[in-house]
Image (cartoon, rainbow, N blue to C red):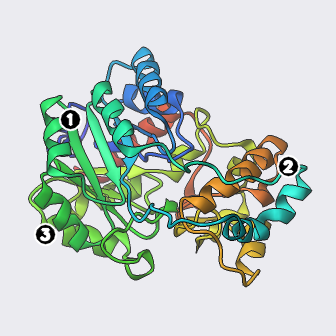
Amino acid sequence: MTGAWRDTALTRALGIELPIALGAFGGLSSVPLTAAVSNAGGLGSFGLYGYDAERIRSTARALREQTGRPFALNLWLPHGDQIPPVDDDDFRAWVAPLEPFFVELGLALPTRPQRYLPDFDEQFDALLDARPAVASFVFGVPSEQQIDRLHSAGTSVLGTATTVAEGRALAAAGVDAVIASGFEAGGHRVSFLAEPEDSLIGLFALLPQLVDAVDVPVVATGGIADARGVAAALTLGASAAQLGTAFLVCAESAISDAHRSRILGADAESTVLTRAFSGRLARGIPNRMLRELESTGTPLAPFPVQNWLTAPVKAEAARRGDSELMSLWAGQAAALVRRRGAAELVDALARGTDALVP
C-alpha cells in the first residue's frame, strides 16, 4: 500500500507520480539519468550550464526520445558574470596559479577567449523553444517577462533559494515553486541576495521557515540521500525532495569513474566549500588541486573565468582517471549513497518513504 505522501501540490501541478526530483548538475548532467528519473515517476532535471542554443535544443530532443514524462531544464541566471576589461597581463596573472597543472598534464596554456559563456538570452530562447514541463533557475530571479513567456508556453517555473529572503523574492516574482537549498548540498552555492558565505543555512532550519514564508510549494534539497531524508523533508512541509549526490553516482550519471570512486570512498565523509575550481563557492571533496590553489596566496580569477580556465585540466584529469586534478562535487550526505541504477534508487526512496510516512 502506498502512502498519501506521494500526492502533493507539486506532484499534482507537474503531473509526476512521486515528489522526488533529480538535482540539475551544471556540466555533469546526462540524458540517460534525467530520463530514467522521469520514467521512474520522479522529476528528472538537466543542467544547461555552458550550453549554446543549438546544444539546448538537441538535448531537449534527445530527452524526448527517451522519456514522454515531465522533465526540467535548468539555467544559470547571469549574476555578477560581467568581467571588467582586462589586458593580457591580467589574464596571464590568472593563468599563473594553474600553469603547473597544465604543464603536468601536457596541455597548452589557454589564451584569452572572446567570451567565457554563451549568451543568456540565446539560451533562454532555446529553452523556451524546447517547452519543457519545468524550467528551473539558479543564481537569481527570472524577470516577469521571462516567467510570463514560460507560462504561456505551458512551462512551470522553479527558482532556487538559499535564504528565506531569496525565497520571498522568487515567490513575489511569480515562480510556481521554490527550491530550498540547504548549505549541505554539493556543488555551487547559488545565493544571489548576499554573499554565499553569509547565506549558509542548513536545510532543517531553512525549509520550515521558507514553507511558512511563501504561498507556493517548496522543494527541499541539501543533505538528502535516502528515504529518511525524503521523509524528514516532507514532514517539515516540503512538497518534494530533490537529491543530487545520491543520483550522481548512479550508473547513468555522466561523472567520471574517478569522481564516482571518491564519492563512494572514505573521503566522502569530509567535504569543504571552495572557490578554487570556478571562482564561485561550491562544495566538494578536497584534493591536491584544491589545496594547492588555495595555498598559492595569489588571487584567483573570478567566475566565470576561473571555471573556464580550469575546465581543460579537469577534463584531461577525468580522461586519465586522476581524481587529484578535478572538481569532486559532493554534498555532506555523500557517505550515505550507494552505486545503483537510477530507477532502483527511485524505487528504494519510494518504498522506504512508504514505510516512514503515512
Identify the residue position indicated by label 2 in the image.
107
From where the camera sits, is residue 50 visible?
yes
Taking the spot 20% from the left edge, 35% from the top edge, the residue there is: 14
Identify the residue position indicated by label 1 in the image.
14
**Amino acid of disc 3:** Ala
Left or right, residue 198 beside residue 193: right
**Amino acid of disc 1:** Leu
The one nearer the camera, 32 or 337, is: 32
**Label located before the other in sequence (3 or 1):** 1
Calculate the distance from the C-alpha at mark 3 to the C-alpha at mark 1: 22 Å
The crowding category of the residue bearing disc 1, from other C-alpha atoms within 10 Å (few below 14, some 14 to 19, many at least 20), is some
Tag in front: 3 or 2: 2
* Image location (x, y in percent) of residue 33: 51, 32
- Above or below, comparing residue 26 to residue 132 in the picture: below
The one nearer the camera, 88 or 18, is: 88
Identify the residue position indicated by label 3 in the image.
213
